Image (spheres, coloured by chain):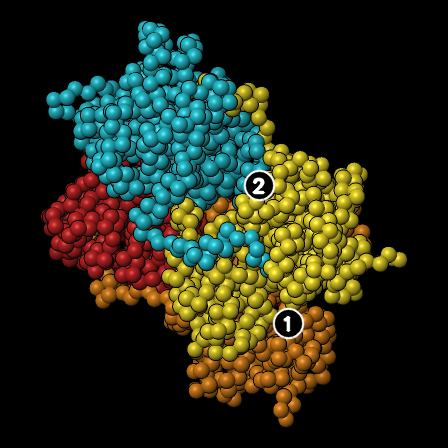
Chain colours: A red, B orange, C yellow, D cyan
Amino acid sequence: MGTKTVYADVKDLALAGKGRLRTEWAERQMPVLRQIRDDFARDRPLEGHRLAACLHVTTETANLAITLKAGGADVVVCASNPLSTQDDVAAHLVADHQIATFAIKGEDHDTYYEHIQAALAHKPSITMDDGADLVSALHMLALERFDDLAEPVRNWATRLGADERNAVVRGVIGSTEETTTGVIRLKAMAKDGVLQFPVIAVNDSYTKHLFDNRYGTGQSTVDGILRATNILLAGSIVVIAGYGWCGRGVAMRARGLGASVIVTEVDPIRALEAAMDGFTVMPIDGAARIGDVFVTLTGNKHVIGEAQFKLMKDGAIVANSGHFNVELDLDALGRMADAPPATVREFVQEYRIGGRRVYILGEGRLINLAAAEGHPASVMDMSFANQALGAEYLVRNGAQLTRAVHRMPEDVDRNIAALKLRAMGVAIDTLSPEQQHYLVSWDMGT
Amino acid sequence: MGTKTVYADVKDLALAGKGRLRTEWAERQMPVLRQIRDDFARDRPLEGHRLAACLHVTTETANLAITLKAGGADVVVCASNPLSTQDDVAAHLVADHQIATFAIKGEDHDTYYEHIQAALAHKPSITMDDGADLVSALHMLALERFDDLAEPVRNWATRLGADERNAVVRGVIGSTEETTTGVIRLKAMAKDGVLQFPVIAVNDSYTKHLFDNRYGTGQSTVDGILRATNILLAGSIVVIAGYGWCGRGVAMRARGLGASVIVTEVDPIRALEAAMDGFTVMPIDGAARIGDVFVTLTGNKHVIGEAQFKLMKDGAIVANSGHFNVELDLDALGRMADAPPATVREFVQEYRIGGRRVYILGEGRLINLAAAEGHPASVMDMSFANQALGAEYLVRNGAQLTRAVHRMPEDVDRNIAALKLRAMGVAIDTLSPEQQHYLVSWDMGT
Amino acid sequence: MGTKTVYADVKDLALAGKGRLRTEWAERQMPVLRQIRDDFARDRPLEGHRLAACLHVTTETANLAITLKAGGADVVVCASNPLSTQDDVAAHLVADHQIATFAIKGEDHDTYYEHIQAALAHKPSITMDDGADLVSALHMLALERFDDLAEPVRNWATRLGADERNAVVRGVIGSTEETTTGVIRLKAMAKDGVLQFPVIAVNDSYTKHLFDNRYGTGQSTVDGILRATNILLAGSIVVIAGYGWCGRGVAMRARGLGASVIVTEVDPIRALEAAMDGFTVMPIDGAARIGDVFVTLTGNKHVIGEAQFKLMKDGAIVANSGHFNVELDLDALGRMADAPPATVREFVQEYRIGGRRVYILGEGRLINLAAAEGHPASVMDMSFANQALGAEYLVRNGAQLTRAVHRMPEDVDRNIAALKLRAMGVAIDTLSPEQQHYLVSWDMGT
Amino acid sequence: MGTKTVYADVKDLALAGKGRLRTEWAERQMPVLRQIRDDFARDRPLEGHRLAACLHVTTETANLAITLKAGGADVVVCASNPLSTQDDVAAHLVADHQIATFAIKGEDHDTYYEHIQAALAHKPSITMDDGADLVSALHMLALERFDDLAEPVRNWATRLGADERNAVVRGVIGSTEETTTGVIRLKAMAKDGVLQFPVIAVNDSYTKHLFDNRYGTGQSTVDGILRATNILLAGSIVVIAGYGWCGRGVAMRARGLGASVIVTEVDPIRALEAAMDGFTVMPIDGAARIGDVFVTLTGNKHVIGEAQFKLMKDGAIVANSGHFNVELDLDALGRMADAPPATVREFVQEYRIGGRRVYILGEGRLINLAAAEGHPASVMDMSFANQALGAEYLVRNGAQLTRAVHRMPEDVDRNIAALKLRAMGVAIDTLSPEQQHYLVSWDMGT
């Protein structure tokens, strides 16, 4: 850590060595972000900016944070989920990069919000969010809805004078948001007229949601389930609640591993797609009776609750891969159970209900981060390229942007894809002038 | 035909009986359109309207035409492709439903445009297009670009006085368009400021392009290739040019039949999706050397031309499933060949180039309609539900719509999906009030 | 036909031109058989032999017959199924190759057996069978079980003196058999001690049953269903009865086209494989209630009968792709129906039972041959390479073989695969001497 | 451990608690073995037998060992691979079940053979092998080929008198063998006439190799690769060397996770199957140039060696999933490398060759056991049901069996499948008497 003191809260700085090796391993598979880091180091586009990033503290996020710092930003990182932190990575960021990091795997509710508070206390000009917890807290502050703040943030907020509070909020030129869930929240805020600054919906970039949500969530969710349980998916019945980009990613991977997949949905168009993709579609209550493994990815709450737990077979395994841990109604399950849950294997809790056993994985938090390592670096390469360029975009254009949710420009999006293909060694075609002309003309017919 | 005389041009009215049976068979799988037909018969929303539909004359189109007539429209149908007409169906429409139909399978270029002209002569208030040939001709008329009209239409147009011509164009309250290709043309027209009336892009409905383009084109294209050639796809290398909705449909079905699939693209995002979907992505020239079967679905011209034909292996099979027959440069192939092509099997033409043979299927026209029967009724059910409801929408709202390309309202789209699911016997979930509230709130976090 | 008179019974010799083109098209995809034909033409291994082939008369069979003739055999061909003959091919064999052919698509029961009788009257020294009908008739002759012979054969047999009958049977040095079904029959004959000559089970060659039964039946069965019905498989529930090589071929192709597939089985090991392959496994009665499309490939009788027809949904489509048309109990269905079946589309018969409709495809005969063109040439290339080499093997070794069912030697099998790979342009590795040594040694461990 | 002293060598008995929980978790998914354990506990078929099991010491093996003990056997367990032991499970067997266990994860070569020696010193009447190391050592003993024994075994063997050595070998009534690799070794021994006792090839049971090798190895190999590397498989090129049951399992799972899969083979029939299954087939040298991830499963040595390592791209990842760690020529790689390998992540070693980096996973030992947890319990349930019943079969029939490699009786095999299906809640059909009769008759034709 040299002579500089970094204010931070991590589990154990001694883990930094392992974290460094793992972060470097991830870096090998992040060629696009590497390119951006080189550009940033040369151009320093974030110079003079204080940046608070509330993200899953993984090896990929470490590479993003290092890139942002290379761009000149004064970066603070806090966890966006109590279970998703990789403690060795957090240590590495602090010890080797002097990046203020507040994240401990398994931290309790209060600690989680103390870390959020620490990020706010950084007085960021740019925020970077994964689920909108940071932005949401900022807005509670702005709207003086102190009661809606978790206690550690409320205490801090009320200690600040009104001027200081306003300064915190007004200092933000904009935020970026990583997830579908966060974008939905932010659009609701914009619709209610309360959004205080422009937001770049990184999630809405094609090079983000088409890849990270589908291929990233798809693989890492089944990876998390396998690491947690070591069950054989072939021959099992896997129930996927929600057929958005994440859900279809998991559905195709579960099938790819030999499971028979059932999809539940509330949207008729998605349900129809699932059916035409060869999946069995049925209401959640029907699925609850026959499923061996359940995964929720809906962005909604209590998708599996008392009614469903009642119907499940002995031995049913239930996981969530949606952003928030509200998709499973664990309170209800706790009330139904004969006794407190027993941990029968790491990340596996057994609830006994009469003669039946229901297994909850990773306490209902996103299973790919709780029991595995989150999205592979190769796919986060694109998501975080969008994050880094999104921060740069806010610096350049934030003043002109309305207080709404914006999408990254399509040419940036397309360029990220082109960089990725080049790094993969994949060449594609280009349009001839004749073909370009043909596409914009309308007078050539049959 | 009773005592009413229907002006029409079909191959042989004696085929009507077979056409009726086949049309009824299709109808069994079009429950959504059936429902709309019942509603139309009761409400007569198209009463008083003259409607010209330029569509592939198939059993599914017959059911649409019958539905439109049931809604009160005075319908005329013309072919949207010289090779796609099912002659028995054309006969059935004329003989059993007294619907004026102008379509003969294998008609030459002049006849094709005589049929377009006949549709224009109907003086439609609503047009329905599949590739925008009809609307395009109407606009050439409006813009007095007579030289750009095919001869049969030009002759007719120049015979009309200016007033009469204007009356034809001004009589149109709007059009619907079925295809991606047509929508691209129409948006180019709107951008150039020449579009004369509003257009409903039926293609842009989710219940159209997500299903028809993907599952419909996917299955029917491989079906067309199999009927034309009876080759084994397992173990062959299939090259798909274009990874739009149609291209990905064919790619997944070719893989589903055991082929090793190569994708070529010009768009980096789509190329990256193809790679992550497990397909091999490479430039068309590389693919040309190793492919056994080629299918173009790009909406562009000369995607496979002299450069590629030169590289192909002996025995290469080449088909187009894009809307227009410009995707293959058959003129170039004709010039390269040692002799005129020989028909070695129905829909298969052999070009000999030195010692090599290249096989072109269906003269480069959409192979699913040329060699098979087009999209299955079950998927056209939704596409044509959009068409029928699009016509009704134009009647109700056409006057208020701008001269631009519009999308069908989302609730109509969603309702079509819901009707389809119900007909398939598939039930889905609904949101609880608590869940609906959660989705629009932004203040509940981790 | 030149000046030689060929005794034959085909539909129309005028179809020969079309048959020739189609046979040549198939030949392009049969490089292994082409190689064997060249070898046969040089070596004439079948010189002096009379060969009766009871096979599906398709373009691929035509290439086999031409090959056998090139090898010196005096060949007669008769149909192995009343619905599978391609009349143009039959005409081509007679008109252009002077091969005696007895086969007419749609021939009735008596004509079918008159054709079998004509093949027997040829007094073959080698027989080639597809389902063992020819060999079975020969044995009824030998065993003097005249009552078990169909009338045309019985009449002929009883007209012959005992000596002449014996001469017919004793003249056969051996037979080859193409199908699983036939091999099961022949093994039953061998077990009962009645088999009169050695049989080469071509079906048991790896290059036959692993390919033809799986990839050939897989593709051609779905092809037949699509040609017969033009339904969309995506989103439908397809029930496959029997998970042998044929059944798994169809199951994987139906899934590959987007269907949700249910498998029914009587063998627990196969059922378990189907489940682990991700298919839903259940008893036929459960499947009958929910299936949209049914395909039988069990080699057994009445797999779908009254009990199942009673349970089916309105609109259920039922096909057989097993060798014999006994898998569906159509007599029972006929008795259940309100009226004789109506042909609502070529190869589709509608049975009405109360308010429900059940559709039988191709009269319950193997749907890939009834409604499509049978296995693609590329896969029959290997099956018929086995047939041709099997005939040669009988000539060389028949005298030494026991009256049992034999398998082709493995090196012949392996060589056919190697020839096929070479024709596909696929190279593989060879073992180094060190590796060969390692494989036969047992003393090198961990 | 009570008052009984168990001779054992495990890492840390304090891990027993965790091992117990994990073993019980596995037991939940082993219903067939559970049933057998209940039967064994009642009937004690192994009473009086000393049984030495040389197996991967995993949670599944623990359940087998417990079952064997319940059957009355005096069981000793030793590791069949230095890297595959789960130390908590070894501790559990000793501490909670008093089963003598010799296995430490990461043990060196000498320790490995000391453990083999300890198993031999148990003087087993039945041996149970996974790769034939134990049986092989027994035979070196019998043949007095002491130089071929690893040092710890040699020392022990030479200490024994000839009589005692003979007693050890002659005391064995038979062995069972788990793997393809072991069966190949044992058949070579039988062919060389040196096999000293009958062997039950558990691997050859359908309920073993069709399931464990395919679905077990398939899933657990990709699981091992993901845990070791956390790379994204979608969009990567995975090279599978060997298309036996294991190879096809991994190929289908790699594809199922979005990889583009290349297969290399030496057998033309398997190569052709791979091609028809849609995989790209090419020689290993071609594959070496383009692969991102390599997996060997051939049962042969040096499948990837100097020639291939030279051609690999920077960053290539190489794993072995074959039984022995000879498939990769790591000595050659070590010689080629600029420096000794660096461990850049657990189970990942980086070799630098000039500017390129090659990553070897799990030191070239079976990656599913080295980096993941081996086959899931659900599939080992059947494999170990075969083992347990194989031991019982040896007790009952060993005296009558020839000194050869035998297969388990088919009805035992079928019964295991039936028990498994029942446990999965899957019902299947049974043949009617009429159908049974049809299958054995040969006189019913077309």
Image quarter of the N terminus of chain B: bottom right
Q: Is mark 2 on a helix, strand or loop?
A: helix
| Image location of residue C301, percent across then percent down | 50, 59
- Pick the front one: C180 or B182: C180
Answer with the quarter of the image where residue D154 lies: top left
User: What residue would you read off at disc 2?
Assistant: C206
Chain letter of the residue carrying label 2: C
Decide: marks 1, 2 in contact (CB < 8 A)? no
- Between the residue at mark 1 and the residue at mark 2, the CA separation in whole angstroms equals 44 Å
Under mark 2, the amino acid is Tyr
Amino acid type, label 1 = Thr
Q: Residues within 10 Å of mark 1 (few under 14, many from 20)?
A: many
Looking at the rendered structure, the secondary structure element under dot 1 is: loop
Question: Depth check: D23 or B152 in front?
Answer: D23
Q: Which chain's residue wears label 1?
A: B
| Residue at 69% across, 79% down | B12
The dot on residue A2 is: none
Measured from the top left, where is residue D86 in percent x and y?
28, 28
Rendered location of residue D134, percent (x, y):
37, 20
In the rendered structure, the answer to whether residue A260 lies left or right of residue A328 reads right
Residue, disc 1: B85
